[in-house]
Amino acid sequence: MPGVRLALSTAPDRRTAERIARLLVEERLAACVNLVPGVNSVYRWKGRIEQDEEILLIMKTTAAGTPALRDRLLAVHPYDTPEFLTFDVAAGAAPYLAWVVGSIGPR
């Protein structure tokens, strides 16, 4: 099975998260994006400790699709420095992994 990856990012609010998620799925860059509300982020930004409630985006893609997903997310995201982290999926249900692979890229 070609490499399936999870990618993580955050968004400042539900409306932004939904807009980004729909765009990434419509453009076949992500097979699915889960929106997890209520993430409380504590981070250092420009020399200060900040704390904000955000929406976590969990995106399913492929290794080959990761660069295009990253580039599009960074282009449409409202943050100056959006989070974008990816993780290889070591194992999963074969039908689900095949669905992810079949959902990415041109049709």
Image (cartoon, rainbow, N blue to C red):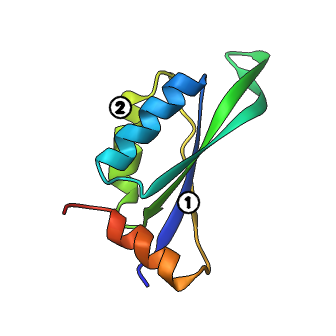
Q: Position of residue 48 (x, y in %)?
A: 77, 14
Locate the C terminus and report the quarter of the image it occupies: bottom left
Q: Position of residue 8 (x, y in %)?
A: 59, 48
Left or right of residue 31, residue 48 in this image = right
Looking at the image, is 4 positioned above or below residue 35?
below
Contact check, label 2 and label 1, Cβ < 8 Å: no
Picture quadrant of residue 99: bottom left
Q: Residues within 10 Å of mark 2 (few under 14, many from 20)?
A: few
Among numbered discs 2 and 1, the one appearing first in the sequence: 1
The amino acid on which the numbered mark 2 sits, given as a three-letter code, is Ala
Indicate the secondary structure of the residue bearing disc 1: strand
Picture quadrant of residue 31: bottom left
Q: CA distance from mark 2 to mark 1?
A: 19 Å
What residue is shown with label 1? 6
At horizontal 61% and vertical 78% (from top left) the residue drawn is 90
> Which is closer to the viewer, label 2 or label 1?
1
At horizontal 40% and vertical 39% (from top left) the residue drawn is 22
Picture quadrant of residue 20: top left
Looking at the image, is 80 positioned above or below residue 35?
above
Indicate the secondary structure of the residue bearing disc 2: helix
Left or right of residue 73, residue 82 in this image = right
Viewer can see residue 81: no
Residue 98 numbered mark, or none:
none
Q: Residues within 10 Å of mark 1 (few under 14, many from 20)?
A: many
Looking at the image, is 67 positioned above or below residue 38?
below
What residue is shown with label 2? 75
At horizontal 44% and vertical 85% (from top left) the residue drawn is 1
Viewer can see residue 58: yes
Q: Position of residue 42 (x, y in %)?
A: 80, 27
The amino acid on which the numbered mark 1 sits, given as a three-letter code, is Leu
At horizontal 35% and vertical 60% (from top left) the residue drawn is 65
- Residue nearer the viewer, 54 or 51: 54
